[in-house]
Image (tube, rainbow, N blue to C red):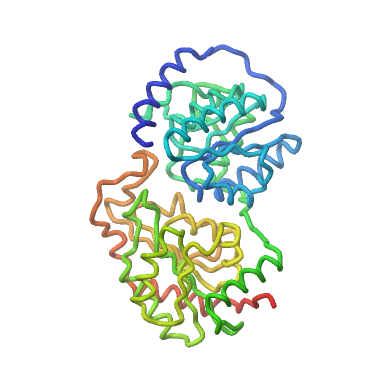
Amino acid sequence: MRSIDRWLGSLLCLVASLWRRRHRPLPTEAPGRILLICIAETGALVLAHPALHWLRQRHPGAELYFLSFKGSQGILNLLGFNQERHRILLRSSPLPLFILDTLKAIVQMRRLKLDATINLEVHTRFSTLLAFSSGARRRVGFHRFFEEGHYMGRLLTHEVIYNPHQHITRSYLSLAMALEEEPRDDPLVKRVIEDLPLERLRIQRSAREQQAMWALLQRLYPSLTKTHRLVILNANASDLIPARRWASENFVELGKRLLADDNNLLILLTGSPGERPPLEHLRQRIGDSRVVNMAGETTLESLIDLYSLCHLMVTNDSGPVHFSSVTELPLVALFGPETPRLFGPSSPHARVIHHPLACSPCVSVYNQKRSPCTDNRCMQMITVDEVHQAARALLDASENHVPPA
């Protein structure tokens, strides 16, 4: 998909730019139907909440729609896009279905008669072409201006410079704000947003849903009582960026230390169904009956229920860093190839461990999140001692959760 976006996408952007009617006047009335596009990063959807909140406050009468991959459906439900007519979902594979869904999406967008699109992807040709194909008269997105590479043509009407020195939540917010500005040839948005308060997405699930999660935990670990302290170890990271992984032997040692600290502590290993075998191996290496392999046992929505019942999570830089931020779960997040300055957790209960080497971050939107690194010393420098110390500090400071009856 990276290769297609880079080579075929650049060609299509050139063709579309030559065909675009540059001087078509833009409408002056407030937009009634706005489509947001965020395809590649499901975790980024949580970070888009401040932009969504701002749009809903500024345009209370507008209908908001979202276009993303099918795997983002759970997050979209939590963001309020739980009606099928307000979301357009693409299957990422196999390729024929991806192409078919893309064509269907274009037809669906044009039938909606959208007034505006906001592209949350950074320097992605595919999402830019989708926005152009939507028929929307106003199209907001990040533009390269005089940066080398990242050719995306001139398909946007409201061009915003991507600022790599501010958290991505504020970059998304600047896209939403650009919708109200007059298009011009220099970068939007010309206002200070650093001091604006950001509305963090917080999800309060029902008592019934939390009770269902408690029942699942009791089924997986029959000895579970309300006196147990529940700690999640999320030892995985996206296959897209394997350099983000903290070594499995570190998670093994961390698990052993935490269990030795507290006889009432229970460790939960979380992951997708495909990650169950390696997590089972990790469970066996820790070698304690108080470790439960929960890979494949939860949906995204029920994962939020799990977070609300637990006392701590230790995780690599991955989606759960952001998913857990919608709850009050204390969090230790391990960063290496990507900087927490841009993509760190929004939760006030998070502790980030990061050793910024001269070569880090080596993964960014400027290289399609690819790195040639095979020796991730930025992650290797994170010691079990410092993670254990941070975990213990958060556990000692956290209040006891009272699970539902």
Q: Is residue 166 left or right of residue 61?
A: left
Residue shown at the point (43%, 73%) measured from the top left: 390
Viewer-nearest residue: 320 or 355: 320
Residue shown at the point (40%, 76%) measured from the top left: 255
Image position, residue 168 (x, y; %):
49, 46
Q: Is residue 222 left or right of residue 290?
A: right
Viewer-nearest residue: 158 or 289: 289
Q: Residue furthest bottom?
A: 263
Q: Quadrant of residue 13?
A: top left
Q: How many marks?
A: 0
Residue shown at the point (42%, 42%) measured from the top left: 164
Q: Is residue 282 above or below residue 60?
A: below
Residue shown at the point (26%, 59%) measured from the top left: 377
Q: Residue furthest left?
A: 375
Viewer-nearest residue: 342 or 125: 125
Image position, residue 243 (x, y; %):
31, 54
Name the quadrant of the N terminus.
top left
Q: Is residue 13 above or below residue 74?
A: above
Q: Is residue 46 above or below residue 176?
A: below
Image position, residue 110 (x, y; %):
62, 24
Name the quadrant of the C terminus.
bottom right
